[in-house]
Image (cartoon, helix red, strand yellow):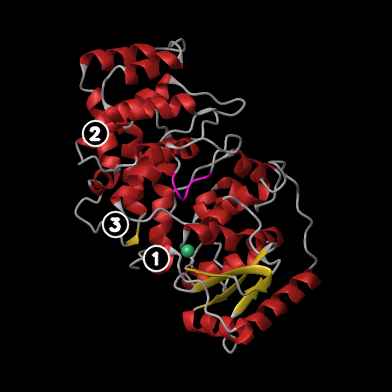
Amino acid sequence: MSVYLNELFTRHLGRVLAQEPVSDDPEEMNWRLFFAHSQDMQGFAADIFVGGPSERRHPTDSSFRGLRERWGRDSKALITDLGSLWAEVQARKALEQLTLGSRGGSVDQGIAVLRSSGRLGAMVFADTLDSFKTGRGSRKTNKMIRAYVQNSALLLNHGASFRQYLQTFAQGSAFPPQTSAACFEATARDRIERDFYNVGPQLANYLISDWLLGLWKDGCIDWFESYKKDSVHEQAIEHGLLPREAGENFIDFCRTVHIPPEYGAVSGKPCPPRVLNACLWQDGNRSSGIQTKPRPVSPRRQVQQAVARDVNRSTRSCELIEEFRDNDRGYCAWLAAHRDGYVLNVNRRPKADYLKLHRPDCPYIVGPIQRQQRLTQGYIKICSVAEADLVAWCRKRFRVEPQSNCYCLSRIP
Ligand SMILES: [Zn+2]
C-alpha cells in the first residue's frame, strides 16, 4: 500500500466505517435512497432537504425542518400522493411544459402545480421546498419537482417501495444479493438510469451504494463497485495522490487495496470504491474543501506507527474497557469494529451526574460523526463490548449506576 493510502486510512477509515449505512429496510430505503439520493443538481443537497435522524442538518438555517419530519407519516403514503399526480393529465402536462428545454419557467410555477393538486403529500412537499434555502450556486428546479412526481409514479408499480423496485433485478437469485453483488448492481444501475427521470449515471450509483455498503459491512456481500465520482476524487487523481493505476481504472485498483487489520469483520477484505472514495472526500474537505497534498510520513515513522498499533492490539485482549480522549480516529475505529458494544459518554473530567450509556448505532452517537463534530474532546468516550464493564466502571469511580435511559438501549436489536 502506498504511503498516502496508508495515511489516508489511518486518518479517515475509522470515521468512514463508523457512519451509518442505509439498512435493508423498505422505509429507510425510501427516505434515505429514493428521497435523499435521487436528486443532486447544481449543489442542491437533497439529503438536507429530506432530513431525518441520519442526514446532515441545514448548514445555515437551523430552523429548517426537513420533508421527513414535516410529513410525519410513512414514506409510502408520500410516494402515493406524489406519484398519483403524474396520472392527472393537467398536472402532468404542466410539469412537462415547465421542464421543456432550457427555459422552463420559474420554480414557483412548479411549486404552484404541487399546491393546487389538493393532495396532502404534494402540498407538504411544496411547503418544504418553498422554505428550503439553497446555498450559493445551487438552485431548486422544476426538473427536480417533476423527477419526484414522475419517479414516485414509477415506484407505484412496485408497491411504492424502492426496495421492491430493486428486487425486480435479482432475476431469480437471492435478494438482497449474497456473496457477489456484481451482476445485480450492474443491471440495477443501468435500469435506474433508464427508468428514472433526471437521474444520470452518477446518481444511479449513488442510489444504491449506501445500501450495498450496509450489506458489505454486515458480511452479506464480499465487495461492491458502485460509488459516486465527485470533484474531490478527481482532484486526488489529478494531483497524483493515488498510484497511476487508480486513475486508469479506479474500481480495479480498489480490488487490490485491502482493509487494514484493526477494523473488525471487514478487515482483510478488498476495499470497495465507495469506502476509499469517502476517505478521499474526508481528506479533501478537511480544510473547507481545499485540497492540500499531505506530507508523506517517513518510513521510520511508519514503522513506529505500526509498532504502536501492534502494542495496542496485544493489550486489547486483557483490557476490556477502552477510553478515548482527543482520539476521534481511535474511537471511530473502535465503533466500526464493535457494533454490538456499549459507549459511555462522559465529561472530559467525568462527573457522577453525567454518565450516559449508549449503543454504537444510537443517533446521539452516529449524529456527531455524520456532522463531523469533535467526538472525544469536550466529552470523552469510555467503550466496552460488555455493558457490565461500564456499569462496574461507574460504580468503582462514583458509586453510582450509569444513566441507561436512552431509547437506544431498549430497542430490539
Ligand atoms: Zn443512545
Whether residue 130 is visible to the viewer of this picture, yes or no, is yes
Crowd tier of the residue under label 3, counting other residues whose Cα lies within 10 Å: few below 14, some 14–19, many 20 or above: some
Check whether the beta carbons of the residues at disc 1 and disc 3 lie within 8 A of each other: no
Q: Is residue 388 left or right of residue 163?
A: right
Q: Earlier in the sequence, mark 1 or mark 3?
A: 3
Q: Which residues are magenta?
A: 52-56
Mark 1 nearby-residue class (10 Å; few <14, some 14–19, many ≥20): few
Identify which amino acid the numbered label 3 is placed on: Pro
Single out the mark in the foreground, 3 or 2.
2
Instruction: Tell me how far mark 1 sits from mark 3, CA to CA.
Output: 12 Å
Residue where numbered disc 2 is placed: 80
Q: Main secondary structure of the magenta part?
A: loop
**Residue closest to the far bottom:** 318
Mark 2, other Cα within 10 Å: few <14 / some 14–19 / many ≥20: many
* Along the viewing direction, whichever of 325 and 61 lies nearer the viewer: 61
At 33% across and 25% down in the image, what residue appears?
123
Residue 259 magenta-drawn?
no
| Residue 316: % across, % down | 60, 84
- Residue 55 sits inside the magenta stretch: yes
